Amino acid sequence: MNVAESATEDVPACRRPRLAYLFSIYPATSHTFFLNEIAELRKLGFAIDVASINRPAGAASELEASALAATYYLKATQPTHIFLILLKILFTQPRVVLRGLRAALQLDGWNLPASCYAILYLLEAFLLGDWLRRRGHTHLHIHFGGPVATVGMLTSMAWRLSYSMTIHGPEEFYDVEKFYLRRKVERAQFVICISDYCRSQVMKVSDPVHWAKLHVVRLGVDHQVFAPVPSIDRSGAMEIICVGRMVPAKGHLVLLRAFAKLLRFGYNLRLRLIGDGIERSGLESFVRSEKIESAVIFEGSLSHEATRQKLARADIFVLASFAEGLPVALMEAMAMEIPCVSTFVAGIPELIRDGVEGLLVPPSSEEALFAALERLTCEPDLRRNLAAAGRRRVLQHYSLQDNVRSLADALRSQIAGLL
């Protein structure tokens, strides 16, 4: 038994802070930090119930399977059960129904399509509120500020519960009116921002009177799990690895173009792409058109442990993103002492200082990305120095355990008078 578990057992259940979390989809392979955050909070004495709007297709690990079994899924509720719950609320909580309808219809006024979506979100809010009430919760914490937070805000307004959010970006910042971000911040008890950049974007759309409720608490990785491995004596190709969903925002095509140019210049390299998504078929077509299939490996979506094992064999990590929050994949690679190349986007420069813990290039610049990758390929001393500095950066500022303790302190201070 470790110290954290012992401390948890010493705290009587009635004195543990109780908290309900809401996600859009949980557990998600691409968002393993959610699982880690909740696991660490529980070690620190929090009693947490989890609700998710959507149910994932399956579980990739024992931890995910355990989370899957313990999570309440709104959209997985049987239609007959939904009808009975809504009927019960209508007859026993008519004020909840009226408050919810008023709140939903006021979101977009006379915009009929948006109002129809609002009503669908309201139905989910009724189910969520009923579950929260049965579980004895009076406060809800929500990850992300998009549609999932709309459901959370309507739940709060209908059932008169308090709520808070963790904002990641960048999707929430693309259309703040569509996502009602200003109103969500105004009504929230407090807001956790994962970076200073993230906080600046929330400040931009919020009245200064609400700025005091914005708190920066960074994400983190377990540096004991993501630890350096003995170097591999590889006489063949150097391996570049990229971990990320294959969506336009990740900049995979720019990476492939820069990589193809490196091959044309005669460098002996291999590129391993981990992730899946709507861009994959187009990226595979590009690889075929360039006749570089033998040098590019499409791994698809892998479990977290399988990804860690692939990272252990990598010489360089690259993320050519156009838009980001603050990529945990970068933190994991840095923790494993893999030299990283990424872009001057959002919170990334807070994680990597260019030339100190990695190399940063302008997003969309194939030429700059080519030059950075060529430089790392040719300079082993630079690779070693950046790799060592990257791990030090993670240990100092992006430790999972340290940052979840900061989150726990923020949650305790903010919800102490609400529970």
Image (cartoon, rainbow, N blue to C red):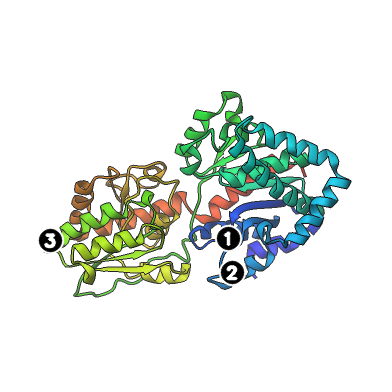
Most extreme residue toward the front is: 112
Q: Residues within 10 Å of mark 3 (few under 14, many from 20)?
A: few
The mark closer to the camera, 3 or 2, is 3
Determine whether 146 is above or below 24 in the image: above
Is there any visible trace of residue 417 in the rendered image?
no
Q: Whole-Å distance between the Cαs marked 3 and 1?
A: 42 Å
Determine whether 139 is above or below 261 in the image: above
Quadrant of the frame with the N terminus: bottom right
Quadrant of the frame with the C terminus: top right
Q: Residues within 10 Å of mark 2 (few under 14, many from 20)?
A: some
Q: Whole-Å distance between the Cαs marked 2 and 1?
A: 8 Å
Query: Dot 2: what SS?
Result: helix
Residue 281 sits in quarter: bottom left
Residue in front for this viewpoint, 332 or 140: 140
Query: Dot 1: what SS?
Result: helix
Question: How many circles with numbers are drawn on the protein?
Answer: 3
Q: Residues within 10 Å of mark 1 (few under 14, many from 20)?
A: some
Numbered badge on residue 264: 3
In the rendered image, which residue does mark 1 sit on?
35
Q: Are marks 3 and 1 in contact (CB under 8 Å)?
A: no
Q: Position of residue 369 (x, y in %)?
A: 23, 50
Q: Position of residue 371 (x, y in %)?
A: 18, 50
Q: Amino acid at mark 3?
A: Arg
Numbered badge on residue 63: 2
Q: Position of residue 399 (x, y in %)?
A: 49, 54
Identify which residue is drawn at 24% across, 75% down: 233
Identify which residue is drawn at 33% across, 44% down: 353
Q: Amino acid at mark 2?
A: Leu
